[in-house]
Image (cartoon, grey):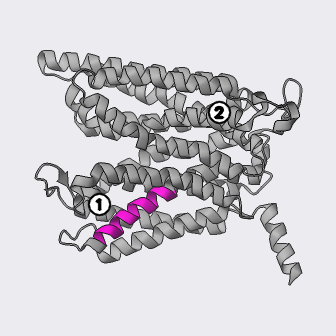
Amino acid sequence: MSEKKSGGWRANKWIRAAIPGLLLHCSIGTVYCWSYVSEGIGNYIGYEKATVNWAFSIAILFLGMSAAFLGNFVEKDIHKASLIATICFSVGMAGTGFFVWLGGKQFAANGSPSVAALIGIFLCYGVIMGIGLGTGYLSPVKTLMLWFEDRKGLATGLAVAGFGAAKAIGAPIMVALQNNEKIGVVNMFYILAAVYFAMMFVGHLLLKKPEGWHEPSGAEKKPSIMEVLKTKPMTNYIGIWLMFFLNITCGLAFISYEKQIFMTVGFIASVGLLGSISAVFNAGGRLGFSAWADTMNDRNTIYKLIFILSIVFTAIVLVTNGIVDQGQTTILAILVIVLVFVVNAGYGGGFSNVPTLLSDHYGMGSISAIHGITLSAWGFAGIAGPQLGAFIVKMFGEEILAADGIHKINPTGYQAVLYATITLYIVSLIICLLMVKPTEKALAAKAAKQAAK
C-alpha cells in the first residue's frame, strides 16, 4: 500500500487519491453557489427567488438519497462511480442552462413564466446533478482513507475542504459570467458544464485504490450493512446520524441568511468579501477539525467541541441582541460576524469528520456504503434547514429596508432563528455525550492512562 511498493506515479497517494479527490469535490461543491445566481435566474425566467431556490434543496436531497442507495455500488467500483458522477454533474449543469434559456425565451415572448422550464431546472439541477453530487462525494473518500492510513482525517479533510472552497472560488466566477453581457446566465451554465466535466474526468482517470487493498467479490462473503452496524449498539449509529443531521440543519437554517445578516449589522459594502471569508472558514473547518481529530483517541471529541463553540457564540449573540439592535456598536456587529464564521467552520467540520468517525467505529470494509447511508441525513437536512429558517423568519418580525435603501432585511426574524439553532445544538451535544460510545482505541487509551496512575 505504500508508495515504495510499486514505485512511480501509479502508486503515489497524492496523484491517485488527493488530487483526484480535490478535482471531484472542487467541482461538485459549486452546488452551493446557487444562492449567488438564483435571483438572476428567477428574474430571467419570471419566477420568485424562493421558488427557484427549490432547485438547490432538491439537489441536496438527491445527493443524500443517491449516496444512501448507491453506497454499495461505489464500494464495489469507485472508477465507474466517479465516471457516473462526472457525466451526471456536467449533463445536469448543461441541462439547467438549456431550461433557463427555454424559460427566458417564453417569459420574454409573452410575459408568462414557463412551468415546463421550471420543472426542467428542478430535474437537471436537482435530480441529475444531485445524483452526480452523491456519487462524486463518496467516490474519493474511502480511497483517501486507504492511502492515508495514519492521517485519515487530514486526507478526507483535504478533499472535503475542496467541496467547501468551491463556493469561494466559484461564486465570483459565476457572478462575473452571469453579469457579462456577451455571456449571460445561459452560457454561464454551458461554460461551467464543460469546465467541470474536464476537471472531474481527469479526477476519474487518476482515482485508484492502493494495490494492496482487496475488495471482496464474487463468492466471497461480505457482511451486510446491518451486520456491520450491529457490531455496536444501534443507538451508537443513530446518534452519529442524528448529530450529523442536526448540525447541518442548524448550519443551513442560519447560513441561508448569511448575506442578509451581514447587511443587517452594517457591512453592506463588504458582503462579497465577508461571504468569501465565511467560505474559507467553511473549508478551513473541514480540513482543520478533521486533521486535529487525527491527534485524538476519540474523534467524537471534535463534535463536542463544534457543538460547544456553536452554543457559546450563539448564546453571546442572543444575550447581546446582536442582530436585532440596529444601533449596535462595532463590537456587537463583530460578534455576529464571528458567529457566522464559527457556524461555517463547525458546519464544514461536521462533514469531514463523519467518514473517519464511522471508520473508527465500523472499520474500512463497508465504509463507502455506511457513509452513503449516513449522507441521507444531509439530504433531509437540505430540506429541513432552509425551510426551518424561512418559516421562522416569516413568522417573526417584518421586512425593512437595509441601509442601502435597496435590499430588504428582517433583523427580528434572523435573531429568532438563533433560538431554534441553539436548542438544536444543545440537543446535538446531549446526543454526542450519551449515545455515541467511545471507540476501542479511546477505551484502551483511557485504561492505559488509569493504569499509569
Quarter of the image containing the C terminus? bottom right
Numbered mark located on residue 269 in the image: none
Q: Which residue lies at the image location 70% right of the left edge and 58% below the top edge?
A: 294
Q: Which residue is mark 1?
A: 414
Q: Name the magenta segment's main secondary structure.
A: helix
Q: Tell me if residue 23 comes above or below residue 255 in the rendering.
A: above
Q: Work out whether 28 lies above or below 432.
A: above
Q: Nearer the viewer, mark 2 or mark 1?
A: 2
Measured Cα–Cα span from mark 2 to mark 1: 37 Å
Q: Which residue is mark 2?
A: 139
Task: Please tell me which residue lies in front, 13 or 259.
Answer: 13
Q: Is residue 76 left or right of residue 248?
A: right
Tell me the SS state at disc 1.
Answer: helix
Q: Where does residue 359 sit, x and y in percent of width and height?
A: 74, 49
Tell me which residue sits at (81%, 62%) in the image: 441
Classed neighbour count for the residue bearing mark 2: other residues with Cα under 10 Å, few (<14), some (14–19), many (≥20)? many
Give the magenta range.
332-346
Foreground residue among 149 and 82: 149
